[in-house]
């Protein structure tokens, strides 16, 4: 078996295992929290878009950014787009549950407290991702 064929076979096995895991999660119908994390450009948004197809009733945390909106992005869906002044005001008013930024890059990506769907006893009907 060639190296390429062996890699293809390994990928098919991983896909099958992933599909089986997703099916077990669906069948459990229990609350789940997924954290999609990675460096810039790694494909987090692609993963999230696919999760939206698989879990259409799930709730998603929308992070905020001071960077300009890109073509195809929707404020409040992909990010909460903010001015730098609004961001600073948010820091001063403790409006974010977490925050990360770079002093060399002028973009920030905090998560707004007001946009969170906090876990409750009714979590099974309002899943947070």
Image (cartoon, grey):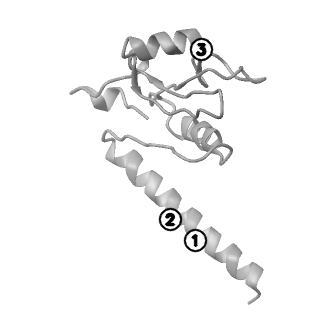
Question: Residue at (44%, 27%) from the top-left corner?
Answer: 59
List the residue tagged with mark 2: 17
Dividing the image into 4 quarters, which one contains the N terminus? bottom right
Residue 107 lies, in percent from the top left, at 63, 27
5 versus 94 height, above or below: below
Q: Tell me the quarter of the picture where residue 58 sits.
A: top left
Residue 55 lies, in percent from the top left, at 49, 37
List the residue tagged with mark 1: 13
Q: Is residue 95 left or right of residue 19?
A: left
**Label whose residue precedes the other's in the sequence (3 or 2):** 2
Q: Tell me the quarter of the picture where residue 123 sits.
A: top left
In the foreground, 94 or 78: 94
**Outermost residue, bottom side:** 1
In the foreground, 20 or 118: 118
Q: Nearer the observer, disc 1 or disc 3?
A: 3
Residue 67 lies, in percent from the top left, at 67, 23
List the residue tagged with mark 3: 84
Q: Secondary structure at mark 1?
A: helix
Could you tell me how far apart the alpha carbons at marks 2 and 1 are, in whole angstroms?
Answer: 6 Å
Question: Residue at (33%, 27%) from the top-left corner?
Answer: 125
Neighbourhood count class around disc 2 (C-alpha, 10 Å): few under 14, some 14–19, many 20 upward: few
Q: How many marks?
A: 3
**Label placed on residue 54:** none
Looking at the image, do the residues carrying marks 1 and 3 touch, with CB atoms under 8 Å apart? no
Residue 46 lies, in percent from the top left, at 65, 42
**Label whose residue precedes the other's in the sequence (1 or 3):** 1
Q: Secondary structure at mark 3?
A: helix
Dividing the image into 4 quarters, which one contains the C terminus? top left
Looking at the image, do the residues carrying marks 2 and 1 touch, with CB atoms under 8 Å apart? yes
Q: Secondary structure at mark 2?
A: helix
């Amino acid at each position: 078996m060639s190296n390429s064929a062996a890699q293809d076979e390994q990928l098919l096995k991983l896909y099958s295992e992933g599909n089986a895991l997703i099916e077990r999660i669906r069948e459990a119908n229990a609350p789940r929290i997924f954290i999609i994390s990675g460096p810039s450009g790694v494909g987090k948004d692609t993963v999230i878009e696919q999760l939206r197809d698989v879990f259409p009733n799930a709730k998603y945390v929308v992070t905020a950014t001071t960077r300009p909106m890109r073509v195809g992005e929707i404020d409040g869906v992909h990010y909460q787009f903010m001015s730098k002044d609004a961001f600073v005001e948010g820091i001063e008013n403790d409006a974010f549950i977490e925050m990360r930024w770079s002093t060399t890059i002028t973009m920030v990506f905090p998560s707004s407290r007001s946009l969170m769907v906090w876990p409750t006893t009714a979590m099974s009907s309002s899943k947070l991702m």
